[in-house]
């Protein structure tokens, strides 16, 4: 059981680590709202990683096929949501006090990244490819317990990356003042919108 857990831990960490739109959101929220918002943003992505890891690990081909059949719709929804988040981030005013954040906004930090990761069709492909290439499917074939350990490791590895990122970026937050937060919103908002535009335009030029 320990081996599948460690394999999942390494896989979850490595898939979460590359900086993309989720990483930008996590860093921006850590800088402007605090470490908890940044970590919960990453935790939403970790939850989606665990869901897709479960699908890939248990060989649920019907669900995988359905998700791939809906690839265009998922990419469109994810791209449009990124554009929306980017616009909202670009126009938002810097938070004067992170303590003013409510439970509702904490939930939004979690739910928004969960939605973004779930609607990224490349996430499921990453896990399917990794499980096949590294022989991780053997854990599922060996029984229920090793497969659960593998999925738990995926979640823990992904969550560990977001925890480290939010803690490190949080150190920088303490040195920033005033107008710096406004520019963080503008730059991160523009980058999120660009990611969204690329996703939508990729559909227009497909085939």
Image (cartoon, grey):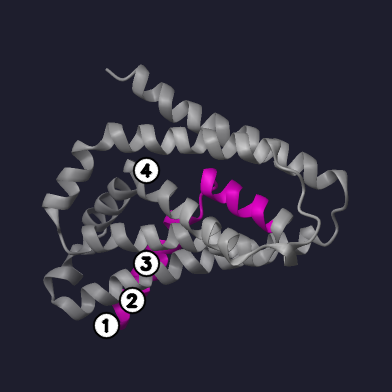
Q: Is residue 7 left or right of residue 173?
A: left
Residue occupying the point 84% across, 54% down: 176
Q: Are marks 1 and 3 in contact (CB under 8 Å)?
A: no
Residue occupying the point 19% across, 49% down: 64
N-terminal-most mark, 1 or 3: 1
Q: CA distance from mark 3 to mark 2?
A: 8 Å
Q: Is residue 11 left or right of residue 198?
A: left
Q: Which residue is mark 4?
A: 120
N-terminal-most mark, 3 or 2: 2
Magenta span main SS:
helix
Q: Secondary structure at mark 2?
A: helix
x%, y% of residue 22? 52, 49
Query: Would you call the spot at circle 1 few (<14 residues within 10 Å), some (14-19), or many (20 or more)?
Result: few
Q: Secondary structure at mark 3?
A: helix
* Residue 52's disc number: none
35 to 86, vertically: above or below:
below
Q: Which residue is mark 2?
A: 5
N-terminal-most mark, 4 or 2: 2
Q: Is residue 192 left or right of residue 120?
A: right
205 to 126, vertically: above or below:
above
Q: Which residue is mark 1?
A: 1
Q: Which residue is mark 3?
A: 154
Q: Is residue 11 magenta?
A: yes
Which is in the foreground here, disc 1 or disc 4? 4
């Amino acid at each position: 059981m320990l081996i599948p857990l460690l394999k999942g831990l390494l896989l979850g960490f490595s898939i979460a680590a590359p900086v993309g739109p989720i990483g930008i959101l996590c860093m921006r929220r850590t800088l402007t709202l605090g470490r908890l918002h940044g970590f919960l943003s990453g935790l939403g992505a970790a939850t989606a990683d665990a869901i897709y890891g479960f699908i890939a690990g248990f060989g649920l081909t019907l669900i995988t096929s359905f998700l791939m059949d809906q690839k265009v719709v998922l990419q469109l929804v994810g791209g449009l949501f990124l554009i929306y988040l980017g616009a909202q981030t670009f126009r938002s005013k810097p938070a004067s006090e992170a303590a003013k954040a409510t439970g509702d906004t904490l939930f939004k930090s979690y739910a928004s990244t969960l939605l973004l990761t779930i609607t990224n069709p490349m996430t499921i492909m990453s896990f399917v490819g990794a499980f096949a290439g590294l022989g991780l499917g053997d854990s599922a074939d060996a029984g229920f317990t090793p497969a659960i350990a593998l999925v738990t490791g995926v979640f823990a590895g992904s969550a560990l990356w977001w925890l480290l990122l939010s803690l490190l970026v949080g150190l920088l937050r303490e040195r920033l003042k005033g107008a710096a937060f406004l520019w963080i919103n503008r730059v991160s908002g523009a980058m999120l919108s660009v990611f969204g535009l690329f996703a939508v335009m990729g559909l227009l030029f497909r085939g």
